Amino acid sequence: MYIGPKPDGIGADLRLAHIDHRAFDGLGTFNDLDRTYFGHLWELFGLRWEDAYLAGRRTTFHDMTGPMLGRLGPFAAGLDAAVIASSTPDAEPGFPLPFLELALDGIDTVFAIADQGAAGAFTALRLTATTLPAGSHGRALVLVMDQATVLPGPPIPEDIRPTRDMAVALVLDRAGARGVPRVRQHAGVSTSDIVTLLRAEVEEAGAGAVTAICRPDFAPYWAKADVSADILPVPAGLPCTGPWVTLSEHCADLAEPPDRKIVLADYDPRLGYLSLCRLDTAAT
């Protein structure tokens, strides 16, 4: 779903001003309406339905959105755009985007990024920070969400299956002090291409050393690139939010932004997507 934008547009060339994350734990249960809805949906596609599919608890995008907005404080005011990025479908036939639009009264644009796996969060940040036209407030919100409750369907590889309910909020602002997000996404990337692309990213940044945020199985590519990198590992079970949870924890440990580059990297070997986000945190 896409709401907006108004003719005068939204924000571009934004900087990271705020990042926060929160874990959730099965806030609700399924109900009879859900059984009717999902049962008919499965029947429509010729699939066998079992009520046991809805025996567990769930945390919906709606459940996570409200509390995350409540944690933004003054950053919730004057938002021009808001984006939800996720790697799994919502655990209810709900309406998280209209809820977000109503909660942020007066916002110009609300949309979602889905069906891109871990790359979705990078796409949301790229579009929000650099692609949308400039607007009046110069502030935007990106909500990244993982949801562990996924109803039976096509098999999900274990390395991209969410095992926890997690949400990350990133606020971008023209006056943000935590760096300019430079997002690059490459398609059709083979493992032999990754080292070359990492070197090019660091060389363009003019950085002798970087803080690299990545999944443990990606760390060897940094070593092969012969780049001085302090590796901050991404936790397992969070295919969409993981890199941003690590960034949030790292930022919380800093009294002020470091005078070095932070590079978040994620690679999907099935889709051939390499996503990179460099935060230029040095003074400009």
Image (spheres, grey):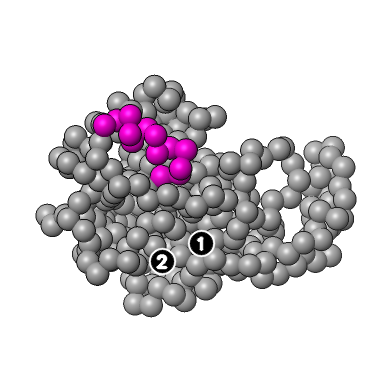
Task: Residue 35: say if magenta.
Answer: no
Left or right of residue 151: residue 141: left
* Residue bearing mark 1: 167
Q: Amino acid at mark 1?
A: Ala
Left or right of residue 187: residue 133: left
Count of numbered circles on the image = 2
| Placement of 124 over or under 104, stated as above or below | above
Left or right of residue 183: residue 60: right
Residue 29 is tagged as none
- At a point 52% along the width and 40% down the height, the residue shown is 116
| Placement of 186 over or under 242, stated as above or below | above
Looking at the rendering, the stretch of residues picked out in magenta corresponds to: 214-226
Could you tell me which secondary element the residue under label 2 belongs to?
strand
Residue 3 is situated, as x and y percent measured from the top left of the image, at 47, 56
Q: Amino acid at mark 2?
A: Asp
Residue 179 is situated, as x and y percent measured from the top left of the image, at 24, 56
Query: How many residues crowd around disc 1 within 10 Å: few (fewer than 14), some, or many (20 or more)?
Result: many
* Residue bearing mark 2: 20
- At a point 66% along the width and 70% down the height, the residue shown is 27
- At a point 84% along the width and 65% down the height, the residue shown is 32
Query: How many residues crowd around disc 2 within 10 Å: few (fewer than 14), some, or many (20 or more)?
Result: many
Residue 194 is situated, as x and y percent measured from the top left of the image, at 37, 28
Look at the magenta stretch and give its main secondary structure.
helix
